[in-house]
Image: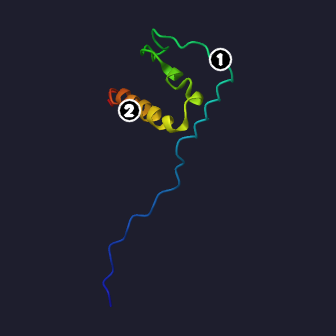
Amino acid sequence: MTEPTAPRPVPGPYRPGPAPVAAPEAPPAGPQPEEPTAATADGNPAPADGNRRLDGLDELPVSEHVALFEAEHARLQGELGTIDPR
């Protein structure tokens, strides 16, 4: 016969996580207003090029899309790497 093991803790009651975040609304079709270049509402510097980096993507051959996306991804990683994790 095996020896009894020590009692294990019983799981507590269900605790729901944070409420789901609503998806942002899709931007309206057509020309977009210029992004501010000075600062955003929270005081952080606004992006100089913003979404304009991908302007004209539909005119490029699909074979050139990957290089453009990789360059933008590298730029974003560099920007996000400067954030202080506190």
The residue beneath circle 1 is 31
Q: Which amino acid does the dot numbered 2 rest on?
A: Ala
Q: Earlier in the sequence, mark 2 or mark 1?
A: 1
Disc marking residue 42: none
Q: Quadrant of residue 84?
A: top left
Q: Is residue 56 above or below residue 38?
A: below
Residue under label 2, please give it.
74
Q: Is residue 30 left or right of residue 63?
A: right
Residue 69 position, x and y percent, is 47, 34
Location of residue 81 with respect to 45 vertically, above or below: below
User: Residue reaching furthest bottom?
Assistant: 1
Q: Quadrant of the C terminus?
A: top left
- Number of residues whose C-alpha sits closer than 10 Å to that of mark 1, classed few (under 14), some (14–19) or many (20 or more): few
* Distance Cα–Cα, label 2 vs label 1: 27 Å
Say whether residue 67 is left or right of residue 55.
left
| Farthest-out residue, top | 38
Residue located 58% across and 36% down the image = 21
- Residue type at numbered disc 1: Pro
